[in-house]
Image (tube, helix red, strand yellow):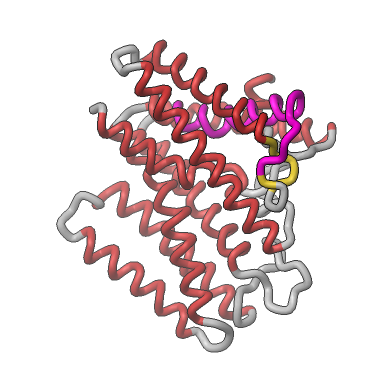
């Protein structure tokens, strides 16, 4: 139950009933997550695809709030330029995210990678031709969602396939369990606000506590399953990934605040949306992929 709670907790004010739903969500989601990660690289790619597509959909909902809506938000987003433009943008985002996951999984090492990627982003840019609204804003939102959400999450699959399960465990531990550490330390010792305009419940003390928890968990994990990797190297990677994960969380919080919503969606009971769960990895994943490659 403690691990399930850690899976679901983030450093924001929650009521007892909300926390109970998060614990139950964690109890169901954790076995599925662990099973998909351990079963095979391809089962993990399936998880990555779901995470990338769901997160891109929600990111576009935040980046393109409904025109004329008082608050915008994921539940009523249609995009700049009206209903048709919003639907076209989200459809293009989903197709682009699927192609990026397939590209990273199957062909990113090919000599055709750069032309293929250029063609993908060029096709996305054509979405701006949809009549009405601001085409530059629409295309910009799609490109941001693909570059800052879909591609980093797709790299998780490459991390699992090339570096192994331990490195995937590291990134999950330093982001999700680091968040849990930040929450509990912040609740007990938090005094100074970290970013009050973006996320009022986060504290400096919680942030430091989460980083310490992340480093300790990562070092312990590698000591148990990958003892050949230097503990100092693991500690440095864990610290960097945790800091980047916290920045990714703040980035998404800023998007939600601008859109006037609490969560990016309602897909995960008691918690919010897919992007709420994977926002930390959008900045942390590329860093961990590079660090893992340096020790292979």
Q: Quadrant of the C terminus?
A: top left
- 184 magenta-colored: yes
Residue nearest the viewer, comparing 204 with 213: 204
Q: Residue furthest left?
A: 111
Q: In the shown orientation, is residue 27 left or right of residue 41?
A: right
Q: Main secondary structure of the magenta part?
A: helix
Over which residues does the magenta segment extend?
A: 170-194
Res 249 → quadrant: top right
Count of residue discs: 0
The location of residue 207, given as percent across then percent down, is 62, 33
Can residue 148 be spotted in the picture? yes
Can residue 28 be spotted in the picture? no
The location of residue 281, given as percent across then percent down, is 49, 42
Res 179 → quadrant: top right
Q: In the rendered image of this protein, does residue 283 appear above or below residue 124?
A: above
Q: Residue furthest right?
A: 16
Q: Residue at x 64, y 73 (%)?
A: 78
Q: Residue at x 18, y 53 (%)?
A: 110
Q: Residue at x 69, y 20 (%)?
A: 1
Q: In the rendered image of this protein, does residue 145 appear above or below residue 3?
A: below
Q: Residue furthest front?
A: 192
The location of residue 142, given as percent across then percent down, is 48, 67
Q: In the rendered image of this protein, does residue 53 appear above or below residue 173?
A: below
Residue nearest the viewer, comparing 236 with 49: 236
Q: In the shown orientation, is residue 8 left or right of residue 215?
A: right
Q: Residue furthest bottom?
A: 131
Q: Residue at x 69, y 30 (%)?
A: 183
- 201 magenta-colored: no
């Amino acid at each position: 139950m403690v691990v399930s709670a850690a899976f679901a907790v983030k450093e924001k004010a929650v009521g007892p009933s909300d926390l109970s739903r998060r614990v139950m969500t964690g109890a169901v989601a954790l076995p599925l997550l662990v099973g998909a990660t351990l079963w095979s690289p391809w089962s993990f790619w399936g998880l990555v695809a779901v995470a990338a597509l769901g997160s891109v959909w929600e990111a576009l909902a935040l980046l393109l709030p409904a025109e004329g809506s008082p608050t915008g938000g994921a539940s009523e987003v249609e995009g700049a330029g009206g209903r048709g433009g919003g639907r076209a943008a989200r459809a293009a985002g989903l197709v682009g995210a699927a192609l990026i996951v397939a590209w990273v999984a199957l062909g990113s090492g090919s000599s055709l990678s750069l032309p293929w990627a250029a063609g993908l982003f060029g096709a996305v840019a054509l979405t701006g031709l949809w009549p009405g609204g601001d085409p530059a804003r629409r295309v910009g939102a799609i490109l941001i969602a693909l570059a800052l959400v879909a591609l980093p999450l797709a790299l998780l699959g490459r991390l699992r396939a090339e570096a192994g399960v331990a490195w995937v465990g590291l990134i999950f531990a330093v982001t999700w369990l680091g968040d849990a550490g930040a929450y509990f330390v912040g609740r007990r010792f938090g005094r100074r606000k970290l970013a009050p305009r973006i996320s009022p419940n986060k504290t400096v003390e919680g942030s430091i506590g989460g980083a310490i928890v992340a480093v300790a968990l990562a070092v312990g994990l590698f000591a148990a399953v990958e003892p050949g990797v230097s503990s100092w190297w693991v500690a440095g990677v864990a610290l960097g990934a945790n800091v980047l994960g916290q920045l990714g969380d703040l980035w998404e919080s800023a998007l939600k605040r601008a859109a006037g919503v609490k969560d990016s969606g309602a897909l995960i009971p008691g918690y919010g949306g897919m992007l709420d769960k994977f926002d930390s990895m959008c900045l942390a994943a590329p860093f961990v992929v590079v660090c893992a490659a340096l020790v292979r």
